[in-house]
Image (cartoon, rainbow, N blue to C red):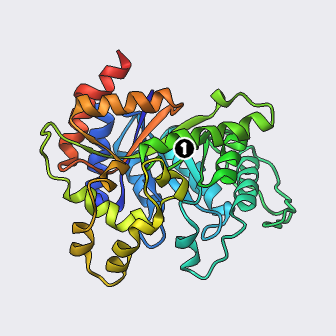
Amino acid sequence: MKFGIRFIDYLGSIRERVELTVLAEQAGFEYVWYPHDTFMHNTWVLTSAAAASTSKIKIGSVGTNPFTTNPAEIATYIASLDELSNGRAVLGLGLHTHKMVEWTGTDASHSIQATREATEIIRALLRGEVVDYQGDQFQWTDQCYLRFKPLRYEIPVYICAFGPEYLALSGEIGDGSLPMITPPESASYMVPAISKGAIAIGRDPKEVDISGCAWLSLSADPAAPTDILRQMISYFGWGLEAEALKTIGLTPQDFAPIKALIDAGEYQRAKDSVTQEMCQLALTGTPKQVIAQIERLADQGITQVNLGGPIGPDPKEAIRLMGEQVIPYFQG
């Protein structure tokens, strides 16, 4: 099992999250990821700051989409980050949800084809090719090529996807896949969909690093408060996949009253409305409990656990516990 960590906007300022990244590297995490969400802090600044402050950890943005950002900009970004980090860049290309893109009046209904074409374009640019590309979503001229030499001609591309067809695409074309395994039980739905895409083109599914993003609330105290986890669930729970929620007996409709409170600005009431059943969306508990939950993910085919959400009531303590107890357990 490989270990990644995902630092969302709610964990603090850019400087604070870079500090957490330094701690994550010291704790033994192999990857750090930052969600590239519309109207949140720009992850290209974050990843650059992280690259300058670390030396080993691989660095990527998740949900970098080809709608609000052209593949030309994505390619120059990831090549520049790779140079700055001395070959530690990874790209999480795709979408978390159509909604965030559609806020800007952009039609994201062709997300699967756009992601496929953007992946082809970015890889060709990194190889130093002239990308005179004529696709369904992108039409480029013979002036489309990098004006500098990348440090690496091949940078890992992880496909950020949801839904059976999109997940299958990640298994077909991705060096890795970035499914949201919220709840963790939904890995039983995500992994086969990803593997199906790989098998369809004669690819060994084991070639795909399945980096499942699981929300985490870790503490040495079994009775630690879960306020920050409930805040996360109240804000994001309504947008999770129906098929994923079904694995723990929930539906998107269960979150409708909470979503109404969020829309009305009633954030405290929304958080208070999150049920204990909804808290099953995350990995929770002490190091021993979290180890058991990660073991189940490994059994279901997750090859990189990508820990996100609140991390814990005290994120620094949670990272320390991961480094002292959880990661060494799996390395041993």
Which quadrant of the figure contains the C terminus? top left
| Image coords of residue 322 (percent x, y) | 27, 33
Question: Which residue is at the front of the view, 62 or 187?
Answer: 187
Question: Which residue is at the front of the view, 210 or 4?
Answer: 210
Q: Residue drawn at (51%, 31%), measured in percent from left and top? A: 300
| Image coords of residue 89 (percent x, y) | 52, 43
The residue furthest front is 249
Q: Is residue 321 above or below residue 70?
A: above
| Image coords of residue 86 (percent x, y) | 50, 38
Q: Write down the quadrant of residue 150 in the picture.
A: top right
Regarding residue 246, the answer to whether it shows in the image is yes
- Neighbours of disc 1 within 10 Å: few (<14), some (14-19), many (20+): many
| Image coords of residue 61 (percent x, y) | 49, 53
Q: Is residue 93 above or below residue 29?
A: below
Which amino acid type is shown beneath numbered disc 1? Val
- Left or right relative to 129: residue 260: left
Question: Which residue is at the front of the view, 252 or 143?
Answer: 252
Q: Residue drawn at (37%, 79%), measured in percent from left and top? A: 260
- Left or right relative to 242: residue 167: right
Q: Is residue 194 above or below residue 14?
A: above
The residue furthest top is 332
Residue marked by disc 1: 90
At mark 1, the secondary structure is strand
In this figure, what is the number of numbered marks?
1
Which quadrant of the figure contains the N terminus? top left
Regarding residue 152, the answer to whether it shows in the image is no
- Left or right relative to 40: residue 320: left
Q: Residue drawn at (26%, 75%), measured in percent from left and top? A: 267
Q: Write down the quadrant of residue 95 in the picture.
A: bottom right
